[in-house]
Image (cartoon, coloured by chain):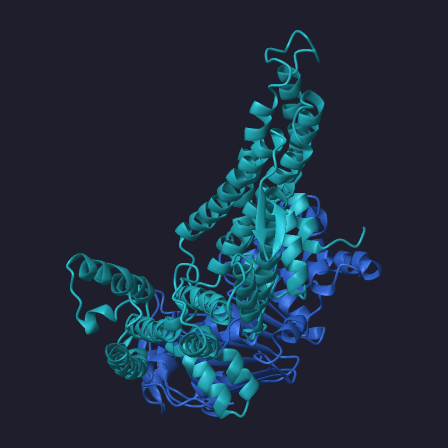
């Protein structure tokens, strides 16, 4: 759906993106992550045909963003991290305006049902007569999203859509993005809230210093992370003072630390894959350890930090 | 819902709240009542026939001062309010956006002007409708000028808040020029006198010529704004519009010359080309990125795209040469007249003026490549102003007549070409050197940034 080839982008006196290449499959949610200044926003603006790259090529559904930017605008939507709204217009008028300017002023026949549909999708039906200036941050975010999605674009590019939202609003946003994927849309979402990205993303694109560090399936990334030495947490139904000693005899287990004085929960480092973790669990049960749980799922946050701190940037081109 | 330009409709919705809709007629009708003593006797305190002394300045305030403020903000305020990206993502055509935004932005001042006009008609029948039309045209021209400047400044990478003020002031200055022009004409009209002017071999009434010129320039401002908005929407422009305006300007200027000779005719076009080329230096994007985009397009086999990415400051050079070279040749071989064509170019020195342009283009490029983070253009303006004006002035006052010093600016017909050619060679080397430095700076700064 989106193909980026050898993309370079310069700001005066500084190269922001260098040799970026990747491909995004249709009907997937890709998380774009990276530290501040990595070039995420610039990359998104280039994909949305709002910025012209210095060199390289971007094809959105086969359409070149430089050669035919207006067609790309009709195929995709972009919501920036810092967006503006017309505070003195009502929610309905804002969405109507966005629809008319995306579809054309003559599309009256389709306007009413589509606007109703998008207001329902973004849960704004009850607020449609309110002035935008009177809305909360989360509600304004939904208005911006409604404006961006009103023309039913196939590609949705969202820059930090969850920033400033409370946990409930974030959960709603996650649901909405999953719903959009179900509708067949391709999404590229950047965020610093990695736990939330992990909830809905299919793939992860890691950008650092203007280069692609990795681009892979989220499950693969987390599985790889699982092969590294990590900390596991064990919870017991009753105290077992000899647990550290018991664990110390097993392969791959490192230092152990109790959590609190009750000796009913603790963490230890472990090196091994899922199979080895299964063997460890079996051995503990055989030794009569009253286990309630043994887990420490690898998180995107953990993988992200490890990738970024793991070494110098590799050349891009991962896909 | 009727099919209305969405930009216009949005602006109307923003500008016309119920309160504002009522406020304007209420205010102006009350004002009219207080002016016209015979209307409601109790409120009136001005004499009949003096209304225009209140209402005409009001037209000035609303049309020439307030209108341009709103017009210049039509795009700049959208950028500041972070709504511009969403508008650029819409499928509205550049033309729909041009007129929708302009008419929408100035709709409320024109609503007020409509009420002022009604008040004037109501209380003062002594005012000449033609003069009145002139004032409104001045307001329209001022608003268009501010709108054009606003869209022009929107091309900048960063929009300092000062740009909006400059656009406002630019529009107001244009409005003032038009206003006072029309005011002089109105006085002539009120006396029933005629003031003929000869233009393009025809005798015109000054007032008619003023209206004619104003409408022509309004047309070009709309056209230029449209072309600039095309750029904002992601289209590319080849500079045919620029050359069209240059030809128009030359032809318009030529109209003032009585029985122009061939060198003078060509000189008029050369002058227009030179003026616009210097103007292009001010707002053209001069950066390494621009050059890379151009070279990149050429390398991937897209010559049309490479031409579109070619900076305007480069594009204009062959065009100016196309006028200045024949101007010089015809002046030297066909006509020995040394009469000034306007204020800039003697036909014999068209080629010299072109060489100055070449040198100054190089200076702009060198300084812009040297200071890519900004400030290069301002320094270049200062340097070129010094070299084109201050140094020659000092030399002239000091009675210094060395040829190399004289070559800073055209003074006499016995112009010596060698020094300016040497200067061009030096500046070319400087541009190359700064280009190399910019390339190495760009590749090293990327990795040392974090």
Q: Residue at x 59, y 50 (%)?
A: B214
Which of A20/A230 is in front?
A: A20
Query: In this view of the protein, which residue sits in the foreground, B258 or A310?
Result: B258
Q: Is residue A39 left or right of residue B180?
A: left
Quadrant in the rendering for residue A235:
bottom left
On the image, which quarter does residue B138 sit in? top right
Tell me what residue is drawn at x 77 percent, y 61 percent.
A114
Q: How many marks?
A: 0
Left or right: B122 as drawn, with respect to B313:
right
Q: Residue furthest right?
A: A109
Q: Residue at x 50, y 54 (%)?
A: B150
Check the image and name the residue furthest to the top. B42
Q: Colour of chain B?
A: cyan
Query: Visible in this render: residue A285?
Result: no
- B129 vs B99, nearest the viewer: B129
Q: Quadrant of the N terminus of chain A?
A: bottom right
Observer-nearest of B190 and B127: B190
Q: What is the drawing colour of chain A?
A: blue
Whether residue B240 is visible here, answered yes or no, is yes
Residue A121, percent from left and from top: 71, 60
- The correct choice, above or below, for A200 with respect to B167 in the image is below
Residue A276 on image: x %, y %? 45, 91
Q: Image height check: is B266 above or below B82? A: below
From the top left corner, tell me how far across and down residue A20 is, in percent.
Answer: 46, 85
State the image quarter where residue A123 is shown: bottom right
Locate residue B98, reporting x and y percent.
63, 58
Q: Residue at x 32, y 75 (%)?
A: B359
């Amino acid at each position: 759906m989106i193909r980026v080839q050898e993309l370079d982008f310069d700001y005066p006196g500084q190269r922001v993106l260098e040799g970026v290449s990747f491909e995004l499959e249709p009907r997937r949610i890709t998380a774009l992550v990276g530290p501040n200044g990595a070039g995420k926003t610039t990359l998104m603006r280039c994909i949305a045909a709002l910025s012209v790259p210095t060199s390289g090529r971007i094809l959105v559904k086969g359409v070149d963003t430089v050669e035919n930017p207006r067609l790309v605008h009709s195929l995709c939507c972009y919501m920036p991290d810092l967006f503006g709204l017309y505070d003195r217009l009502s929610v309905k008028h804002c969405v109507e305006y966005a629809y008319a300017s995306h579809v054309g002023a003559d599309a009256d026949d389709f306007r009413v049902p589509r606007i109703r549909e998008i207001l329902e999708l973004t849960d704004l039906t009850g607020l449609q007569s309110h002035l935008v200036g009177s809305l909360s941050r989360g509600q304004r975010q939904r208005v911006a999203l409604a404006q961006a999605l009103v023309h039913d674009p196939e590609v949705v590019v969202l820059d930090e859509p969850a920033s400033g939202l409370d946990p409930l609003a974030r959960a709603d946003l996650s649901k909405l993005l999953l719903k959009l994927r179900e509708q067949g849309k391709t999404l590229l979402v950047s965020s610093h809230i990695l736990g939330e990205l992990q909830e809905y993303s299919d793939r992860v694109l890691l950008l650092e210093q203007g280069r692609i560090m990795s681009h892979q399936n989220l499950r693969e990334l987390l599985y790889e992370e699982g092969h590294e030495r990590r900390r596991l947490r064990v919870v017991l139904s009753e105290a077992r003072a000899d647990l550290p000693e018991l664990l110390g005899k097993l392969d791959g287990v490192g230092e152990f630390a109790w959590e609190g004085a009750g000796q009913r929960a603790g963490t230890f480092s472990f090196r091994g894959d899922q199979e080895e973790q299964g063997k460890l669990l079996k051995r503990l049960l055989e030794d009569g350890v009253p286990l309630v749980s043994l887990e420490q799922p690898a998180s995107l946050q953990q993988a992200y930090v490890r990738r970024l701190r793991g070494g110098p940037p590799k050349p891009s081109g991962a896909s | 819902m009727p099919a209305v330009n969405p930009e216009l409709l949005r602006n109307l919705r923003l500008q016309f709240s119920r309160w504002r809709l009522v406020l304007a007629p209420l205010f102006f009708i009350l004002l009219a009542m207080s002016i016209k003593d015979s209307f409601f006797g109790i409120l009136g305190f001005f004499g009949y026939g003096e209304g225009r002394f209140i209402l005409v300045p009001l037209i000035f305030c609303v049309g020439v001062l307030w209108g341009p403020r709103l017009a210049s903000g039509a795009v700049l305020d959208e950028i500041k309010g972070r709504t511009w990206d969403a508008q650029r993502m819409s499928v509205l055509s550049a033309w729909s956006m041009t007129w929708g935004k302009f008419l929408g932005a100035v709709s409320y001042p024109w609503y007020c002007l409509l009420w002022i006009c009604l008040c004037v008609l109501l209380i003062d029948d002594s005012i000449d409708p033609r003069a009145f039309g002139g004032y409104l045209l001045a307001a329209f021209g001022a608003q268009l000028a501010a709108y054009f400047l606003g869209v022009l400044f929107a091309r900048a990478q960063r929009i300092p808040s000062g740009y909006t003020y400059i656009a406002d002031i630019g529009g107001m200055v244009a409005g003032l020029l038009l206003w006072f022009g029309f005011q002089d004409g109105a006085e002539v009209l009120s006396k029933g006198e005629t003031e003929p002017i000869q233009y393009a071999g025809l005798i015109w009434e000054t007032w008619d010529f003023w209206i004619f010129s104003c409408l022509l320039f309004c047309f070009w401002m709309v056209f230029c704004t449209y072309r600039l908005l095309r750029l904002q929407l992601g289209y590319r422009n080849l500079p045919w519009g620029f050359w069209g305006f240059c030809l128009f300007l030359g032809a318009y200027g030529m109209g003032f010359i009585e029985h122009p000779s061939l060198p003078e005719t060509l000189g008029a076009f050369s002058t227009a080309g030179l003026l616009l080329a210097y103007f292009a230096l001010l707002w053209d994007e001069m950066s390494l990125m621009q050059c890379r985009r151009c070279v990149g397009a050429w390398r991937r086999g897209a010559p049309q795209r490479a031409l579109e990415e070619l900076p305007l400051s480069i594009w204009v050079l062959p065009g100016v040469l196309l006028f200045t070279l024949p101007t010089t040749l015809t002046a030297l071989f066909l006509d020995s007249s040394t009469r000034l064509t306007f204020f800039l170019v003697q036909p014999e020195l068209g080629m010299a003026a072109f060489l100055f342009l070449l040198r100054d283009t190089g200076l702009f490029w060198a300084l812009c490549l040297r200071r890519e983070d900004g400030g290069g253009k301002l320094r270049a303006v200062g340097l070129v102003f010094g070299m084109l004006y201050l140094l020659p002035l000092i030399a002239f006052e000091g009675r210094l007549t060395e040829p190399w010093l004289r070559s800073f600016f055209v003074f006499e017909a016995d112009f010596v070409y060698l020094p300016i050619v040497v200067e061009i060679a030096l500046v070319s080397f400087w541009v190359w050197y700064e280009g190399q430095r910019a390339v190495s700076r760009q590749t090293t700064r990327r990795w040392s940034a974090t």
